[in-house]
Amino acid sequence: MTTADLKAFLLRALARKSPATEASLIDGAKNVFLDECRTSDVTAALRALDDGGFITTEHSDGITPTTCALTLKGQHKAKML
């Protein structure tokens, strides 16, 4: 598993269901990549996608979970994958 593979998976997952909770994205990545995937890898990939403008992240207020959604740039990239 490379970082690019993980980012591509996350974009495709969000293209199917956006917005999605960060926890569901982590669980999905762990199911696909099995032992190669750590929670820190997924959160770093989500942070990189957020910094790149591909997703927006609404951080938890302590009651509701952190959610991620595709931006227009992210939708276009997800279609290209």
Image: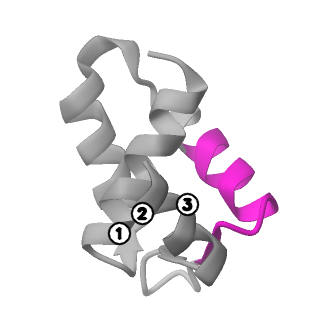
Q: Residue furthest right?
A: 51
Q: Earlier in the sequence, mark 2 or mark 1?
A: 1
Q: Earlier in the sequence, mark 3 or mark 1?
A: 1
Quadrant in the rendering for residue 40: top right
Q: Tally the marks.
A: 3
Q: Secondary structure at mark 2?
A: helix
Q: Residues within 10 Å of mark 1 (few under 14, many from 20)?
A: some
State yes or no: discs 3 and 2 in contact (Cβ < 8 Å): yes
Q: Which residue is mark 2?
A: 79
The label shown at residue 15 is 1
Q: Secondary structure at mark 1?
A: helix
Question: Can residue 58 be seen in the rendering of this structure?
Answer: no
Q: Secondary structure at mark 3?
A: helix
User: Which residue type carries mark 1?
Assistant: Ala
Q: Which residue is mark 3?
A: 77
User: Which residue type carries mark 3?
Assistant: Lys
